[in-house]
Image (tube, helix red, strand yellow):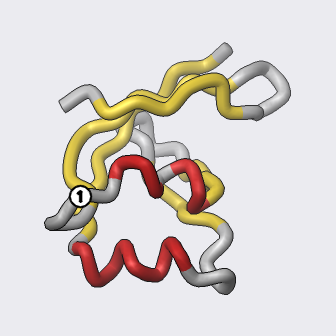
């Protein structure tokens, strides 16, 4: 398993695209410099009235499947 940390700061307007079928994945830059592609549906639970803002912890398995994604700050 691998643990990655990243920050997101997306306005609500930018988050609306997460609900469009054309936006299937989101690429984030982890704190260690790795680019990580996430299914957009995994970010939807974190959308609030002002968008998505905060620091996140992503745990992935050895086969690159998401084990957990949580907002930590």
Q: Is residue 11 above or below residue 20?
A: above
Q: Nearer the viewer, residue 25 or 45?
A: 45
The extreme top residue here reads 1
Q: Residue at x 24, y 65 (%)?
A: 51
Residue at 21 percent of width and 53 percent of height: 53
Horizontal and vertical percent position of residue 61: 73, 21
Q: Which quadrant would residue 14 be assigned to in this image?
A: bottom left
- Left or right for 27, reference 51: right
Q: Residue furthest right?
A: 63
Q: Give the image quarter of residue 70.
A: top left
Q: Quadrant of the N terminus?
A: top right
Residue at 36% over, 41% down: 6
| Residue 41 coordinates in the image, percent (x, y) | 59, 57
Residue ID for mark 1: 48
Q: Which quarter of the figure has residue 37?
A: bottom right
Q: Is residue 11 left or right of residue 30?
A: left
């Amino acid at each position: 398993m691998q643990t990655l940390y990243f920050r997101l700061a997306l306005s609500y307007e930018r988050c609306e695209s997460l609900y469009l079928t054309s936006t299937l994945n989101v690429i984030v830059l982890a704190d260690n410099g790795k680019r990580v592609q996430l299914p957009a549906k995994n970010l939807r639970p974190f959308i609030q009235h002002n968008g998505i803002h905060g620091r996140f912890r992503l745990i992935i398995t050895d086969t690159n499947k998401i084990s957990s994604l949580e907002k930590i700050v």
